Amino acid sequence: MEDCIFCKIIKGEIPSEKVWEDDNILAFKDINPAAPIHILVIPKKHIPTLMDLKPEDNELISKIMQTIKQIAKEQGFAENGFRLIANCGPDSGQEVMHIHFHVLAGKKMGPKMIG
Ligand code: 5GP
Ligand code: ZN
């Protein structure tokens, strides 16, 4: 998608600090981290929101979850744990319309964010 920031990051048109890349998935550091470790994990396929996921995307989402596990091991926060957030649509405050999973780690986190 031409006007999508994350598609531009995938194409290398916008620089990013990558922590993982394979044929289908990219993970990179969030530009405005909300925790000592804040990684965004995205599919290379442009899918605007979680509501646009189709049954044929199930394997991709499953691969993203396995990749998050792998990143947690490689980056050293598998033991201490992390928080996984996916915003969807206006009420969540989703800003970038290309699905992404926020992986937050590196500190003891407070109460669950629910509103
Ligand atoms: P959302 O609010 O859509 O769930 O999260 C979008 C995230 O993308 C935000 O945490 C924001 O800091 C991050 N972000 C936006 N633009 C860029 C960018 O150009 N580079 C990187 N690395 N992160 C970005
Ligand atoms: Zn995109």
Image (spheres, rainbow, N blue to C red):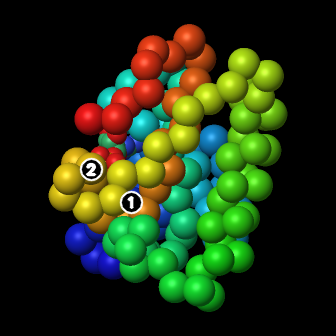
User: How many badges with numbers are in the image?
Assistant: 2
**On residue 112, which mark appears?**
none
Q: Residue 105: give x, y in percent of width and height.
A: 58, 24
Q: Residue 68: give x, y in percent of width and height.
A: 68, 47
Quadrant holding the N terminus: bottom left
Q: Residue 76: give x, y in percent of width and height.
A: 76, 24
Name the secondary structure under disc 2.
helix
Nearer the observer, 19 or 60: 60
Q: Would the CB of label 1 be found within 8 Å of ligand 2?
A: yes
N-terminal of the two: label 1 or label 2? 1
Q: Establish if 3 lies above or below 75.
A: below
- Left or right: where does residue 2 sit relative to residue 103? left
Quadrant holding the C terminus: top left
Amino acid marked by disc 1: Phe
Image depth: mark 1 or mark 2 in front: 2
Mark 2 surroundings: few (<14), some (14-19) or many (≥20) residues within 10 A:
few
**On residue 92, which mark appears?**
2
Amino acid marked by disc 2: Ser
